[in-house]
Amino acid sequence: SMRCFSVQYHPEASPGPHDSRYLFTRFHRFLLGEEEL
């Protein structure tokens, strides 16, 4: 099976400079093998 990471949402519903930061944090942990999806 292929490991993949995807997100779909509307950030303009609550705009801000760090809206997606948690996604990059989770993705980074996923790449390091610290977190499972």
Image: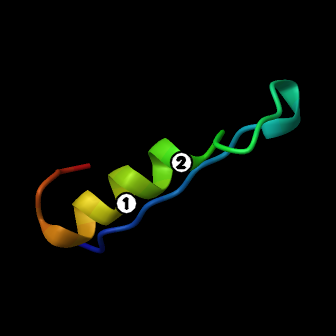
Residue behind mark 2:
21
Q: For this rendering, which residue is in front, 32 or 2?
A: 32
State the residue lying farthest toward the left.
34
Query: If the image is split into quadrants, where does the N terminus sit?
Result: bottom left
Q: Element at badge 2?
A: helix
User: Would residue 27 be found to the left or right of residue 13 on screen?
Assistant: left
Q: Quadrant of residue 32?
A: bottom left
Q: Nearer the viewer, residue 3 or 32?
A: 32
Give the left or right position of residue 12, taking residue 32 as reference: right
Q: Is residue 23 left or right of residue 32?
A: right
Q: Residue furthest front?
A: 17
Q: Quadrant of residue 9?
A: top right
Mark 1 Cα-neighbour bin, 10 Å: few <14, some 14–19, many ≥20: some
Residue 14, relative to residue 27: is it above or below? above
Seen at 25% across and 61% down, the residue is 30
> Which is nearer the N-term, disc 1 or disc 2?
2
Could you tell me residue 29's position as x and y percent?
A: 24, 59
Q: Viewed as shown, does residue 18 lie left or right of 16?
A: left
Q: Observer-nearest residue: 12 or 1?
A: 12
Q: Residue at the location (25% across, 71% down)?
A: 31
Count neighbours of disc 2 (C-alpha within 10 A) and say few if under 14, some if 14 to 19, many if 20 or more: few
- Looking at this view, name the residue that lies furthest to the right: 12
Residue underneath mark 1: 27
Q: Judging from the image, what secondary structure is the residue with disc 1 in?
A: helix
Looking at numbered disc 1 in the image, what kind of residue is underneath it? Answer: Phe
Frontmost of labels 1 and 2 is: 2
Q: Residue 15 placed where, x, y %?
A: 83, 33
Structure colour scheme? rainbow
Identify which residue is drawn at 48% across, 49% down.
23
| Alpha carbon distance from label 1 to label 2 | 10 Å
User: Compared with residue 23, is residue 13 higher up or lower down, i.e. above or below?
Assistant: above
Give the amino acid type for the residue marked by disc 2 in the picture.
Arg
